[in-house]
Image (cartoon, rainbow, N blue to C red):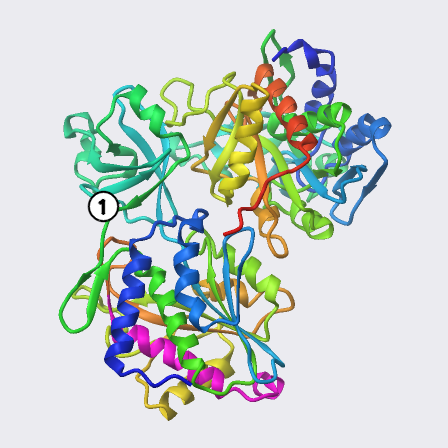
Amino acid sequence: MQEAKTKNQQIEQSKKFLSALSAGSAVSGYEHGLLEMIAEGLRPYADELKHDAFYNVYAKKKGLTGQGTILLSAHSDEIGLMITDIDALGFLHFAQIAGVDAKTLLGQEVVVHGRQATPGLIVPIPESLLSADDRKKAAKIENMRIDIGWTQDQARERVSIGDTVTLKRTVSELLNDCLTGKTFDDRAGVAALAVCLEELSKLRHHHDVVAVATVQEEVGVRGASISAYRLNPDLAIAVDVTHAVTSDYKAEPIEMGKGPAIALGPNIHPALYRKLCDVALEQRLPYQSDPNPGVTGTDARAFQITQSGIPTGLVSIPLRYMHTSVETLHMRDVVHTGKLLAYFIAALPEDLEGMLCY
Amino acid sequence: MNVTDTQNAYPFLQQLTQAFGPSGLENPVLSLLAVATQGYADETYRDTLGNLYVIKRGTSGKQVMVSAHADEIGLIVTFIDTDGFLRFTTLGGVSVTNLLYRRVVFENGVSGVIAVEKLDKPGDLSLEKLYIDIGATSESDAAAKVRIGDSAVFVGEYTETQTRVISKALDNRIGCFVLSEALKQVVSPHTLVFVFTTQEEVGLRGARPAAYALDPDWAVTVDVTRTGDTPKSARMAVRLGAGVGIKVMDRAIVIAPYVKTWISEQARKQQIPHQFEVLESGGTESGAIQLTKSGIPVGVLSIPARYVHSPGEMIDKRDVASAIALLVALLQDQAGPQIPIY
């Protein structure tokens, strides 16, 4: 057993891992660029490590009896752009892959993943070329271009239609262990999985745990669906981010720094919600309740209806400014999420059926 | 690529496009395909969803699924009023603005025209205001010919020029045509399962259980895509006649990069004209196939088509020839798409 790390060491280690993951490029469907980095982060705590044909990464940690299998997931993909055309002046036209907030794109530095990674800028088309209506509205993607500084012929040598584009942004540290950067949705979840596996190596747990860095969540929880089918686990917990309260937010708030948000609602098995809350109270870990009236927009959505139906839970890390390049979170929430999952798994009975019975 | 290679097969495309086959009622189309593929198949069968499987066995131990949907968009009758006018709803992605004064035909040959109630302004056009007039003189006269739940398809005759074809239902009878032509030519080490699927237009429904039943090593889908080469069209870098489309992404799928590379490398080696396709609206059944069971690597060959989901869809025969050649090359490739191991 390794010596317990201090809380601060754990936060610093997670910051480092999350910062590396955040700087990586992995638009939905193109997650192979992140495989090595994820594997490196999870390898120290995993008994087995593999990936499938769609780059889902599976890190397995064996339990004492291995009677059941627990799936934990956090998605590795990020929202991004795809080149749709190269015009006569060498400007690149693009479409979004999944839910990009268009109005935050203008002026961003990007990386075009062509024959080689090529820097570019997202620029508006001149106002004089916009319709009178469009001039009054927030910029639309079809009225933006990427300028890579080349002529059409030069651009065509470097870039093809269908090449992906990611935002260029490194992580910065704000006050009070807060971090800001791109793609904390859901690389923060991947960092939490690493914390969980590390904590589990200090705990006794009956069941095998497979932490999966899932792909293609942002285009429709696609990696979750095929990885859950492959594992057919006894229960599954998705780890994702959720909107944290900001100055303009009026709904029931989830707050940054106040602990993981434990989801409940029809997408969530009630026994898993209760158990997660009980464990948080027992371990004196902060948590917040996160009611979701419909299906959640997370891997949990796919897990619940895979194979014969999988008891599903969802733990979310509070995050501000989702789907922008300045996503902001509190590192304590990331570490607490990992710990909560580990203690939850250690607290599961050997016979899961009794606990999961309605 | 020589258009004349497949020129003598085009009368079969005419038959396919003119056959009746809205989602759920694909039998007339599938019967044509079953007959046409009979001499080239080791085994043919239908499943619960009505999908038609045509199997050509190989010895490599690998199984490849090749799919094209056989159904077309249509209309379905919801109500017959006291004067014998039919109210209806849509089967699949029918655009209401495409419907006015279109001729439609039911499976039993009854014809009708789509007309509209008095509109205060053109913007008021909506599905609720449209009806089908089959020339019935009364409710009972109409009910003797058409029943609630009967489906109709557009009338859209087949026209062929030196290079192009105009017809209804080229989405996706052209895909079925490409599969049946490829079947005739292909000599593959793999077991090829050509699946002519049902109910694609209403939610990729036939392909999903077919992929589940087969769980193939990899799959290729053939369907149409849009173009950006008509006056003031939405911008899209696909042109009619510029080669077969190799799909990169649509709303239902992001093609795995190694599958995209596999297909484009085959096209390059065989010198087959091709273009990359990014479709910002719509999807194909490849999306359902890819997510079946533990995930199935799937590629898509797209036939560029103008005016998709209208009675006058248009394709270019050169693109069709490219698609057949590329499909044959892919199916004959010993290695198939190689999943990179990290």
Q: Is residue A216 left or right of residue A235?
A: left
Magenta residues, start to end: A329-358
Q: Residues within 10 Å of mark 1 (few under 14, many from 20)?
A: few
What residue is rendered at 72% in x and 23% in y? B181
- Using the rendered view, name the quadrant where residue A290 is placed: bottom left
Q: Is residue A331 magenta?
A: yes
- Does the magenta run of residues contain A138? no
The relative height of residue B58 versus residue A203 in the rendered view (above or below) is above
Secondary structure that dominates the magenta span: helix
Q: Position of residue B196 (x, y in %)?
A: 71, 36
Q: Which quarter of the picture shows residue A160?
A: top left
Q: Is residue A262 visible?
A: no
Relative to A56, B137 lies left or right: right
Looking at the image, can residue A106 be seen? Answer: yes
The front one of B138 and B312 is B312
**What amino acid does circle 1 point to?**
Lys
Image quadrant where one finds the N terminus of chain B: top right
Q: Residue at x 46, y 55 (%)?
A: A215
* Residue at the extreme top of the image, as rendered: B162
**At x 65% / y 23%, what residue is drawn?**
B324
Provide residue A347's location: percent of width, then percent of height.
48, 88
Q: Which residue is mark 1?
A: A103
Place of residue A7 in the rendered image (x, y in percent of width and height, measured from the top left)? 26, 82
The residue most toward the left is A175
Extreme residue in the front direction: A2
Q: Which residue: 39% across, 24% down?
A: B233
User: Disc 1 on helix, strand or loop?
Assistant: helix
Label 1: chain letter: A
* Spot occupied by residue B54 in the image (x, y as percentages of width and height): 79, 36
Judge by depth and name the residue closer to the eye, B6 or A293: B6
The relative height of residue A105 versus residue A356 in the rendered view (above or below) is above
Above or below: residue A281 compared with residue A53:
below
